[in-house]
Amino acid sequence: MKKVVVFGAGNIGRSLVGQLFSRAGYEVVFVDVVDDLVKALNERKGYGIESRNVVSETMWVDNVRAVHAEKRDEVAHEIATADIIATAVGVNNLRHIYGNLAIGLVRRLGINRRPIDIIICENVRNASRLFREGLSKHLPAGYPLESTIGFVETSIGKMVPLMTEEQRREDPLLIYAEPYNKIILDRNGFKAEIPQAEGLELKDNITAYVDQKLYIHNMGHASTAYLGYITDPDMRYIWEAIGDKNIRRAVERAMWESGKAIILEYQDEFNEQNMKEYIDDIIRRFGNIYLQDTIHRVGRDVPRKLSRGDRLIGALLLDEKHSVPAPFTTLAAAAAVLFRGRDDEGRLYPRDKVFAEEIYPHGIDYILEEVCGLSFEREKNLVEEIRRTYRSLVEDPQNWLSIVD
C-alpha cells in the first residue's frame, strides 16, 4: 500500500488531504504536535467528516495513523519510506517542519534515491519558492534538492468552520466541513509519479488559480466578515452577513473588481463566463447556513490579511496594475482596520489583540506603511483611497452604504 505523510492533522489536513488520499487507497500518516490528536488518531485509526449542507452526511476516513512531531526519528522513518508528502500546517508554521523534513529526506536519500513530491497545501503565492528556500537551509551542502524533490503548489478552496470547545470534547477527531473536495495542483511541480486520486485537478499555470483563490475567494470571504462586523458588531455568522442585500452587493462587486483584473492578467485561463460561474458559486457557498462559519474565524488575523501580498492589498495592487477601479475592495481593506471580531468566549484572536492594542493606536498611516507594506510615493493614489475610506468609516461605520446604491 502506498503511503502519504501529511504534516498537519488540522482542518484541511484531515477534511481534505487525508480524506482524498485515503479514498485513493493510501495509508495516511499524520505528523502533528497536538498530543490528544495524535493519541486519538492512533487509537481509532480513522475519523469522521460531517459534510454540512441541506443534506448532511458523515464520511468515515480510515487507514490513518499519526506520529508526534517531537519524535524526530519516527518522523524521519516515515518520510524515508513515504510515496508522497503533503503539508497543511499554515504558512506561518512551515518553518517549524523544515527540520524534521530535512532529517527524513537525508535518511531517504541513503536508502532510496527515487524523487519524492511535497504537495504544499498552504494557500500562499510562490509557495514552491518559499518552501524550497526554507527547507534548503536545513539540508546539508551538496544535497541534490532539485533532482530529488518536487515542490507542488496548490489552490485550496474548502471552507472548514471552527469547532466549539464542547464539540471538540465530544469528539476531538470529528470535523464539520462544506461538501467541496477538490485540490488544484501544479502539474509541472511533480518530479515523481503524479498520484491518481479523485479530487486532484492538475493545472499548468498554477499561479493563475492561486491568485483567483486568494484575490477573489479569500478576499470576498474576508470582505463579508469585515462588512458584517461594521454593519453589526454582534452579527455572528458569515451566512447572516452575505444574506444582507447591501453586504452581498458590495462583496460581489469587490469580487468582480478582482475578477476583471485577473481576467486581464491571465487571459489564457479566464474569461467573463468562467469567472461568473466561479464568483456565483463562491457567493452561494458563503450563504451555506448549515456550515455555521463565523465572522470571527473568517476575519481573524487582521495583520496577515492586510499584509502586502495577501487577499486585500494584493488584490488592490493587481487592480491598480490593470487600471481597474476598486472602491469595494478598498472599502473592505478600510473595514478590516476596524475589525474586532471575538470568539464564543468573547476573546480577540491573539494577533488581533496585538493589532488593536499596540498597532492601531499609531494611526492609519502607520498601518498602511508598516502592516500593509504600501509606499506613500509609489502607491500614493491607493494609500489616499484607503485612508479616505477609513476616515469615513470612523466618522460613521454606516457611511459605506452610500457607495452601494
Image (cartoon, helix red, strand yellow):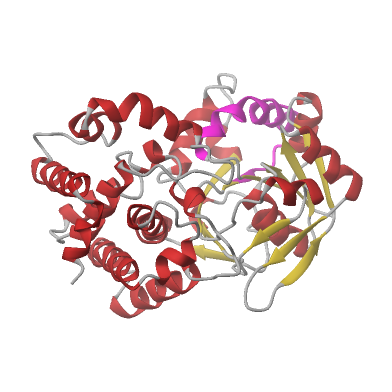
- Asked whether residue 171 appears in the rendered view, the answer is no
In the rendering, at what x and y percent does residue 153 appear? Answer: 50, 50
Q: How many marks?
A: 0
Which is the main secondary structure of the residues drawn in magenta? helix
| Closer to the camera in the image, 19 or 76 | 19
Q: Residue 110 magenta-drawn?
A: yes
Q: Where 255 falls versus 55 (above or below)? A: above
Which residue is outermost to the right? 43
| Closer to the camera in the image, 134 or 384 | 384
| Closer to the camera in the image, 128 or 218 | 218
Q: Residue at x 59, y 41 (%)?
A: 345
Q: Residue at x 9, y 46 (%)?
A: 381
In the rendering, at what x and y percent does residue 171 appear? Answer: 80, 51
Q: Residue 62 magenta-drawn?
A: no
Whether residue 253 sits left or right of residue 279 in the image: it is left
Q: On the rendered image, what quadrant is the N terminus found in?
A: bottom right
The quarter of the picture where residue 366 lies is top left
The part of the chain drawn in magenta is: 91-118
Q: Residue at x 62, y 52 (%)?
A: 12
Whether residue 72 sits left or right of residue 324 in the image: it is right
Whether residue 388 sits left or right of residue 211 in the image: it is left
The quarter of the picture where residue 160 lies is bottom right
Q: Where 161 falls versus 402 (above or below)? A: above
The quarter of the picture where residue 19 lies is bottom right
- Asked whether residue 249 appears in the rendered view, the answer is yes
In the rendering, at what x and y percent does residue 296 appear? Answer: 49, 49
Q: Residue at x 25, y 52 (%)?
A: 397
In the rendering, at what x and y percent does residue 177 appear? Answer: 64, 62
